Image (tube, rainbow, N blue to C red):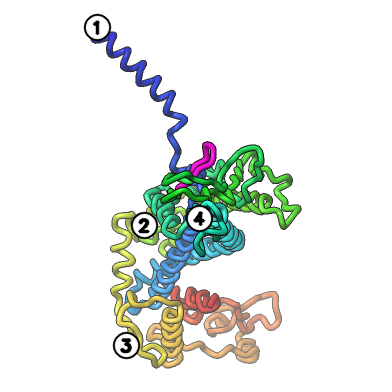
Amino acid sequence: MAKYNTIQAAIGTSVLLIVIWPLMADDSKPATHMERPCQSAYVLSAMVDQIKAKMTAGDGVTADLKKKIAQAAAGLAAPRDEQITKMSGPILIVLTKQLEQIQTKQHLLRGPTVNIIAKLANLSGHQSAVETLSDIKVKGLDLGNGDPNSANNGKTNINFKSTSADEIKKCHKQLDAQEKHFANWVQTAKLYSLKLFTAAVTAEDNSNVRKPAVGKTSGAAPCSKNDVTGTVTTSAAAACIIDGPVTTAKPLHLTKGTGDFGLAGKAVTDTTDFKQFAQKTAIDLLEVTADWGKTTMTFDTGKITSYSSDDDFRAAVGATWAGLSREAALGDKSEAAPQLISTKYGDDSTFSNRYWDKLTQIKLPTTLLGEKQPQTIKEVKTMDEASKMLLQALLEVTTKNQASPSCPTKTEKAEEPKKTPHECKKHKTAEDCKKETGCDFDEKKDPKCFPKAETDKKDEKSFSSNMRVSVLQVFAALVLAAL
C-alpha cells in the first residue's frame, strides 16, 4: 500500500510539473519582464548599464596594467638590485603586449558598443513615452444634472488622465528584484526575443457600448449604460461619463529567428518605420553581445602563469639568465626556460612576494632630474615617473664612463711600435730574424726578413669593455622610444 501511495505521489508530481512548467517564466530572459511599456523601458535601460559595465571593466584592467608597466620599467633602473632589474625585463614585455591587446579590443568594440548603447537608450525613452501615451483615458464624470445645460460650471468639462509618475515608479520597483538577472539579459543565448510597444488610438466601434461612453443614472448609483459601468458614482439622478481609454499599447514582438529578427537582409529600408528601427537595434544588440562574449579583457598580474605561457617571456628569461637563443629556449625538448622561470620567479603562490613586493619596496632617489620624487617604486604610477628614472640611470652610466675611461691594467703591456722593413731586412738568418720582435722570416721572399703583417684581431678584454651594453640601457632605450 505504501509503495502504491509513493507511485501515486510521483505521478501526481509529474502531472503537476507538466501543467505548470510552461507557466514558469525564465527570469534570465529579458522578454519575460517586458509585458508593459514601462517594463520594456526598464529592461532596455538595464541592458545599457550592463553593456557600459563591460566597457568600464576593460578600463580598469588597462589602468592597472599601465601602473604595473610603470613600476616594472622603474625596476629596470633599480639601484643596486640586479636581480629585480633582470626580472623586470621579461615582465615588462608581457605587460606591454597585454596592454596593447586589450586596448586594441576596446578600440574595435567601442564603435559598435557606443552605437548600441545609443539605440537602446533611444528605445528605452520611447517605451517610457509609450507608457504614458498608451494609457490616456477619459476621466469618469458626474454632471450633477440630467440636462447638461443645467449642470454646474465645470461639470460638463471632458478631462483626461494617464499613468502617473508614482505608478511608473511602482512598475520599475517591481523589476528591481530581478537585479541578479541583469547580466544575463545581455547574453546572446538569452536574446531569443524582445517585446516592445507602440501607442495607438482605440479603434472606433459603433456596434457596442464600450468605454468611454455617456450614461445616465436614475439615482445614487455608478455611472453605467447597458452592461458598461464606470468608476464614478452619482449622488442623484444625473447624466454622467463612463471613464475609459482613448489610447492603448500595441505590442511588437521581435523574435530572433536566424538572427535577423524578421528584418530582410538585416537592412533598414524605411527610416520612418519604427518596427524596422527596433528590428535593427535587436540585430545590433545580438551581434555586440556575441562580440563581447568572445572577448576577454582580464589579466592577473600577480600570477606567474599569466606570463609563463608567453613565448616572448620564455625567450627573454632564457636569454637573460642563460644566454639562450630563442630557438633553444622555446624548443620542444628544452626545459631550461621553464626551470629558470620556476627558479627565478617562483610559482603563483610566491611570485608576487618574490617580484612585486620586493620591487615596490625599493627606495628611490629623493630627486629625479632635479624634481622631488616618490619615496618607493610603489608610488610610481605613470610612465612619466618611470621614464625619468630610466633617463637618469642612463645619464649616470654615461657620466661614469666618461669620468673613468678604459685604461690598461697592470697585466696589460703597452703595444710596441710596428717594425720597419729596414729594421728587419738586416737579419740574414731565420734565427736572427725571429729574435727581432715584430719581424717574420721566409726563405722564398726577398728580403727574407720582413715586418709581421697586422691582423684584425683585437684584444678581447678591451673590445668587450668598449662594447659593453647593460640590460638597463637596452630596455630603457626601447621604453623611451615607445613614449
> Is 94 drawn above or below residue 190 in the view shown?
below
Q: Distance between the residues labelled 2 and 4?
A: 79 Å
Q: Which amino acid does label 2 sit on?
A: Lys
Say which of marks 1 and 4 sits in front: 4
Where is 78 relative to 403, above or below? above
Residue 427 in the image: state x and y as whole percent: 60, 86
In the rendered image, is residue 97 in sight?
no
Q: Which of marks 3 and 4 is in front?
A: 4
User: What residue type is disc 1 on?
Assistant: Met
- State the CA–CA distance, disc 1 to disc 4: 71 Å
**How far, Cα to Cα, is label 3 from label 2?**
31 Å
Q: Is mark 1 on a helix, strand or loop?
A: loop
- Circle 4 is placed at which residue position? 143
Q: Is the magenta stretch mostly helix, strand or loop?
A: strand
Residue 366 numbered mark, or none? 3
* The residue stretch that appears in magenta: 224-231
Residue beneath disc 2: 303
**Outermost residue, top side:** 1
Based on the picture, tell me whether residue 149 belongs to the magenta stretch.
Answer: no
In the image, farthest residue toward the left: 2
Question: How far apart are the alpha carbons under marks 1 and 3?
Answer: 90 Å
| Amino acid type shown at disc 3 | Thr
Label located before the other in sequence (3 or 2): 2
Q: How crowded is mark 2: few (under 14 residues within 10 Å), some or many (20 or more)?
A: some
Query: How far is the residue under mark 2 from the one under mark 1?
Result: 62 Å
The residue that mark 1 highlights is 1
Q: Earlier in the sequence, mark 2 or mark 1?
A: 1
Specify the quadrant that holds the N terminus: top left
Q: Would you say residue 227 sits in the magenta stretch?
A: yes
Query: Looking at the image, which is closer to me, 144 or 261?
Result: 144
**Disc 3 to disc 4, how far (Cα)?**
88 Å
Q: Nearer the viewer, residue 50 or 343?
A: 50
